[in-house]
Image (cartoon, rainbow, N blue to C red):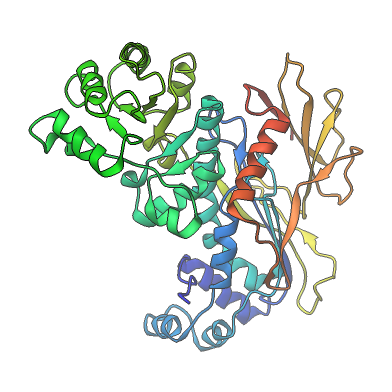
Amino acid sequence: MTSTAFFTDRYELTMLEAALRSGRAGCPATFEVFTRRLPERRPWGVFAGLGRFLEALESFCFGPEELTWLEANHVVGPATLDFLAGYHFSGNIDAYREGELYAAGSPVLTVEAPFGEGLLLETLALSIFNFDSAVAGAASMITAAAAERPVIEMGSRRVDPSAAVAAARAAYIGGFASTSNLQAGRRYGIPTAGTAAHAFVLAYPGEKEAFAAQVASFGPATTLLVDTYDTMQGVRNAVEVCGPHLGAVRIDSGDLGREALRVRKLLDDLGATGTKLVVTGDLDARTIAALGAAPVDSYGVGTSVVTGMGAPSAGFVYKLVAVGEPGDGPAAPQRPVAKRSAGKATVGGRKWAWRAQLDERPGHSSGEAVLEATTAGTDLPVWVDVVSTSPRCPHPGGEPLQVRVVEDGKVVHRPALGDIRAYHLAARDRTGLSSPLLLDRHP
């Protein structure tokens, strides 16, 4: 088992050392993960990365190699090294289900543990949730724009190899149908897809020879890339080589809406009425929405789903919200704590969150943070996420959004990836958030 304990920042260990020396490391504490604001033009977020985080948590331990390095580099002293040698997270963690929608202020993860244990998880949690949730949010917007047309994730060449695998997983949660990344297919069981690039066509004396080689290997169900030279001639060559039962053609350049119309008409004229049309080429949610009326059967998306161009960081932070005193037991009351910094103020105390369907927009009670997502001006219902420091939901019928995922240090929540994906799509459809909406945030 490879340790994940060094996927962290040094300041977490310096805080731990000082807390151990002062006697504060054992105080019961509560930490929360939330975002202060959603990315621009992002009406909701998709919580992703929980499965990866829980897997990493089980490997978060300090073995001989880690301890030797810390000692040799004078990161911490002997007492802290002794503590880390026996470290194993022993607390409880509640979280939104992976694939759940969230709004700004939503407590997507709550950690209850001794202060010295909980503070070590900050970087591990944020590095996973910020990336995975950003990708899943972008993927969900893309697949919502694509409606029933499947989308292939093709972003491996735009990010670090390890990030590419994580991105493929998050994009699948967000509704993508498959990935080009083989490691993601092997590790997570995501369907894989891919045929050929322009380099393959250019390597042959002519387009027909390249197509013939591909069809000879993969049969007529393959997808031929037809825009290396002249798209319309490429379509003619593809049908001539393969016949009218060619599986699909792909176009990757030009005015994609216009090209899709021309390609579809030519395929039909040549008798290839069953041949599918795959479109790729710097697509995002906006361009895919614009192609809604075009005769496209599926899309391939890379850059805009895996990088900051389309998947800006989710902006999650990991904050202490309540803490007890030395000698207190886990069940002892904790005093709320909060930052007052300008622009970065927090709300003290442990939070609870529910989602409720209402007949009308609710009033706002003091002490509650109410976050509404509603499709104003439509017949869709009003859904409201209520975040409160009280463990009782103020709205009858409200469904709790958090579930227990770690109990006394043991992972107790392991849904299959396919179930996570299905949960997200159902939540998105049930709340009507696959449509344009108005998101109001209330302090």
Location of residue 294 by image quarter: top left
Indicate whether 129 appears above or below 273. Answer: below
Q: Where is residue 384 in the image (x, y as percent from the top left)?
A: 78, 33
Location of residue 174 by image quarter: top right
Indicate whether 50 appears above or below 59. Answer: above
Location of residue 258 by image quarter: top left
Q: Where is residue 387 in the image (x, y as percent from the top left)?
A: 77, 43
Q: Which residue sits furthest right?
A: 396
Q: Which residue is drawn at 69% across and 38% down?
A: 427
Q: Is residue 260 left or right of residue 370?
A: left
Q: How many labels does the image show?
A: 0
Q: Can residue 337 be seen in this view?
A: yes
- Between 408 and 183, which is closer to the camera in this rendering? 183
- Between 81 and 44, which is closer to the camera in this rendering? 44
Q: Which residue is drawn at 64% across and 79% down?
A: 22
Q: Position of residue 439 (x, y in %)?
A: 67, 27
Q: Where is residue 368 in the image (x, y as percent from the top left)?
A: 82, 40
